[in-house]
Image: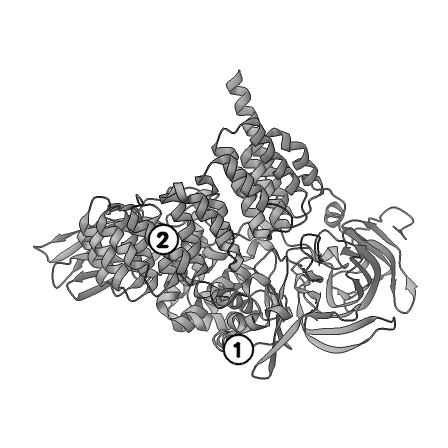
Amino acid sequence: MKNRCMGPLRLAGWILPLLLIGSLFASDQTPYRYDYGFQDPDAPRHYSRPRQVDFLHLRLDIRVNPAEETISGVSSLTFTPIATPVDTLLLDAADMQIERVWTGKDRDLSFHYRSPHLAIYLGTAYRPGDTLTVNVAYRTQSPPMGLYFVHPEPGYPDKPVQVWSQGEMEESRYWFPCYDFPNDRMTSEMLVTVPEGYQTISNGALIEERPSTQRGWKTYHWKESIPHVTYLVSLVVGKFVKVEDRWKDTPLWYVVEARDREKVSRSFSATPDMIEFFSSHIGVAYPYEKYAQTCIRDFMWGGMENISATTLTRGTLHDEKAHLDVSSEGLVAHESAHQWWGDLLTTKNWNHIWLNEGFATYFEALYTEHHRGRDEFVLELLENARRYFQEDSGKYRRPVVTNRYYDPEEMFDRHTYQKGGWVLHMLRGLLGDQLWWKAINHYAHKFRGQVVETSDFRKAVEEATGRSLKWFFEDWVYHAGYPELNVSWRWDGQQNQARVTIRQVQRVTAQTPVFRFPLSLHFFSGDQEQAFQVFIRDTVSTYSFPLDAEPSRLEVDPEQWILKKLHLEQPVEAWAAQLLHSPYVGSRIQAAQVLADSVASSPAAVEALGGALKQDAFWGVRRAAAKALAGAGSQEALAALIQGCKDAQAKVRRACATALGRSSGNRQVVNQLNALLKKDPSYYVRAEAVKSLCKVDPKRALRVIRYALKKDSHEEVIRRAALKSLTEIDPAKAIKIAGEWAKDGKPYRVRAEALKTLSKLASSHKLPETLAGRVQQILLTQLKDENFRVWRAAVEALGEAGDDRALPELKTRLAREKHFSWAQDIRKAIRKIEQRQQQQSAQTH
């Protein structure tokens, strides 16, 4: 590695602030004592990086060699000082060779490089208003992050050659020298040279494609004229077909492998309508030169919103049969919404990432409301709430905005996505649609082309609406949790009033407050509905409402405007009436969930759920009814579920198949599940039938598993169901089958499932030493696999199995792992094994 810095790093006070020097060469000393940084009171605090200069333009002139996994070329950065003279430029550059740095035509500059930081000495002090371009010649091979190379493998000879980038959070530094933090924006262009026969997709417009000066190579010139942050710089290299579409005058490209051409329409046909919806409602028309969506192999995320050039997992493409259960609409809408929320306006630092991801999550739901109606929208909101509650109760609780965590990747969680989306939904409910959209339009116009933090959004909303909203953001963004409500009511016949008491019963701490929010209460008497709204601000609130007649039930927040958990004291008959007659889909789903607790003892609950499963107009309610009937066990419940297996909606049939798996397994149930397995058109229904059949008819489980393992399906759901069901058969036979399906050459998702099954077998049975050793050998072998799904499944499985013989291999893998979340997975597995060792040692003594 060449180093043109001949002396020690100079420490001129106004040239290189001490704060930056400290961070420049400091090693990461974080102990990672907890599974999540949010749990650690000593986790580091994170702030925006101080800026000395304003970067104006990035120009990459690079050669990518897929066969050798090399990137070489020049990264040129144009900048101007912000406030004080600058004679040293700091860049990010990780695990690469810096060959030369110069400016102008040929004026070499000294530099000091210690990965991942590059300090460049400019030779003179440049003042605010001056503009300078610095060129960095570099090369790197097989970067651990940032740019990923995909190749055919011995077990997968048909796998295509592809190269693709992933810059978020701060991974661009691994494939080109840059300023790798999201608080600066610049225009960009890329001249990328690749072997002939390969295409490239990058940001902005394709200015030119031409033969390279070197025979057998071709150069593509891309240019993005809208300033953006560095992590949005994107490159995909491969052999693709491009399906072209348009939104007004903007080209839309759907880029896939030739073998996937017929699947394009199912995944992307709604794109023009999405772009139109977001443009018209946000009030800013889609601003970029084109919009490309490229599906790639081995992508670790669902999608990445690179500016004008989204990257998506190939798994979102699906055939006609999978389309009964699967849709790309949510993913495509989410990444399309990011072209505004995340690209045109970008979070200033990772503490405020909800301004990207919470917005994209809610605008994904808003497109659902626009395209599929209010019922589907409410169902999506309820699912988002469920996923957030699951993380909040099962892992950790944190504010939406926080600066204490181990690594920025931790912020990409359900608090950011799902709760962040709910914050916007509650704000919409508080303001009303007219003011909500006025505020969104104002925010988008005021801050387009800028980096933002939460206070910018709050102030924009206040400016647009005249409202003071600091209290709202304090409760819902800067504090944690949600209200847990206990609601009771009684009828006062003398006063013709309903008396309602509302208690917030969540544990109030410095982190979790007593929340403030509007709450609607709807009383029903026969077909008559009377609605009231109150504003909750106390731990206990009591209200009296004059009514025309004694109500038979109360529905709390039936339109689902508040993120909450609700316990409402009402008899089964009231919940049954709510399930069968409420005009609000959220209330009907809530009633089904409440009645699930009564199905074992209440025929009225079973009757109401059976009626909803048979006749509710919305499939989401029918599915909720099927899930609720799972614990009933009565003949009436089984009859309703068997009838539900004929529902027109595949997702309802899936729920019925799952529910039947909890029954005693009489011949009628077994016959119905067999019929679903053999004849249902849905891959996913058949997968559920596999699992349920193996539970209710364990004597025939091995036959069912062998049958299912022969069946191809979307995302391998049928084979994965078969492997999950191996826990129902003899462990020795199960380990043999799982071991075969864990081998190289089997589909990656199937291999990962086989490894998870092996860990369950090892942890749930006291296996003979020979079988335990066999499981350990399989898991350790797969730990060395290069596919992230496979080796991460092996890590998790080794942690669950708890065998201390795995510790050396796990620690070796940890030492070379750069991805934070993947390294954390390994640390968790090591902790589990060490804790088990300690427990066994304590029991021995």
Estimate the x, y position of residue 306 in percent, counting from the top left: 63, 66
Instruction: Bin the neighbour count of mark 2 within 10 Å (Cα to Cα): few under 14, some 14-19, many 20 and up.
Output: many
Please indicate whether residue 393 sits to the left or right of residue 98 in the image: left
| Residue with the mark numbered 1 | 272
Estimate the x, y position of residue 553 in percent, counting from the top left: 19, 56
Q: Furthest-top residue in view?
A: 845
* Label 2 close to label 1 by CB (< 8 Å): no
Q: Does residue 537 appear in this view?
A: no
Instruction: Bin the neighbour count of mark 1 within 10 Å (Cα to Cα): few under 14, some 14-19, many 20 and up.
Output: some
Q: Please tell me whether mark 1 sits on a helix, a strand or a loop.
A: helix
Picture quarter containing residue 244?
bottom right
Estimate the x, y position of residue 183 in percent, counting from the top left: 65, 60
Q: Nearer the viewer, residue 805 or 249?
A: 805
Count of numbered tags: 2
- Amino acid type indicated by mark 2: Leu
Q: Furthest-left residue in view?
A: 494
Q: Nearer the viewer, residue 456 or 823?
A: 823
Please indicate whether residue 487 sits to the left or right of residue 270 in the image: left
Please indicate whether residue 242 sits to the left or right of residue 637 in the image: right
Q: Please tell me whether mark 2 sits on a helix, a strand or a loop.
A: helix
- Amino acid type indicated by mark 1: Pro
Please indicate whether residue 353 sits to the left or right of residue 599 in the image: right
Q: Earlier in the sequence, mark 2 or mark 1?
A: 1
Estimate the x, y position of residue 559 in percent, counting from the top left: 32, 63
Q: Does residue 220 appear in this view?
A: yes
Of badges 2 and 1, the one in the foreground is: 2
| Residue with the mark numbered 2 | 673
The numbered mark at residue 496 is: none
Q: Nearer the viewer, residue 722 or 373?
A: 722
CA–CA distance between discs 2 and 1?
41 Å
| Residue occupying image coordinates x 54% and y 63% | 316
Q: Nearer the viewer, residue 661 or 548?
A: 661
